[in-house]
Image (cartoon, rainbow, N blue to C red):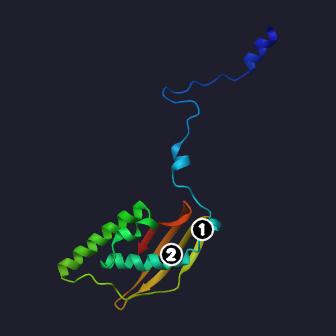
Amino acid sequence: MSNALAQNQSQPARKARPRGERRGAFDAEQFFGHQPTPSAELPDPHPLIENLASSVIEVLAGARDLEQLSRWITHDVYSNLLRRSVLAARSRRTRGVPARRPRMGVGPVHMCEPADGVIEAVTIVSTPNRARAVAIRLEGVDGRWKASSIAVL
């Protein structure tokens, strides 16, 4: 009997679960949230970067609806571009300038990969009136690239 008592004393005491927590509960985000994807499982980001850069300039010019980009950008980027496009539309309205699709050319894309599944790139988008740098950060999420940051300078 003393042997059984010694075994019980050597086992660590069980921690009581907080009230409402079930045994075997799992974190739903772990299974159903956005899943990171490694670069090897993603397509070439070069065409997406060129298309996103020109599309963002078109959104700011009022020639493209921001909803068309929603699949490839995060909610934060969407909110930022929405705010900027509203300000640009207000500026055009006060000056009496209609929204037009700009003629543009996209320059060479410079990319780096700071981590697996992350691409940071910059390109120059040139219109007849000005040239703008567009910096884009892509992250591999759920098997596709998604822009988590876009800056138009």
Horizontal side of 100 relative to 150 (left or right) equals: left
Q: Position of residue 133 (x, y in %)?
A: 44, 80
Residue 124 visible from this viewpoint: yes
Residue 81 image position (x, y, % from top left): 36, 69
Q: Are marks 2 and 1 in contact (CB under 8 Å)?
A: no
- Left or right: 45 as drawn, with respect to 99: right
Residue in front for this viewpoint, 79 or 64: 64
x, y (%) of residue 109? 53, 81
Indicate the amino acid at tag 2.
Answer: Leu
Across and down, in percent, residue 27 comes to: 54, 42
Sort mark 2 into few (<14), some (14-19) or many (20+) by Cα contacts within 10 Å. Answer: some
Q: Is residue 144 left or right of residue 4?
A: left
**Dot 1: within a 10 Å radius of its alpha carbon, few (fewer than 14), some, or many (20 or more) residues?**
some
Against 60, residue 4 (above or below) is: above
Residue 117 location, quadrant: bottom right
Find the distance from the CA under tag 2 to the CA under tag 1.
Answer: 12 Å
- Point out the residue furthest to the right here: 3
Amino acid marked by disc 1: Leu
Considering the image in quadrants, where does the N terminus appear?
top right
Which circle's residue, 2 or 1, is located before the other in the chain?
1
Q: Quadrant of the C terminus?
A: bottom left
Up the image or down, 145 lies above or below 126; here it is above
- The circle on residue 42 is 1
Q: Which residue does the image show at 56% across and 39% down from the upper left?
A: 26
Helix, strand or loop under label 1: loop
Numbered badge on residue 48: 2
Front residue of 129 and 37: 37
At a point 47% along the width and 74% down the height, the residue shown is 135
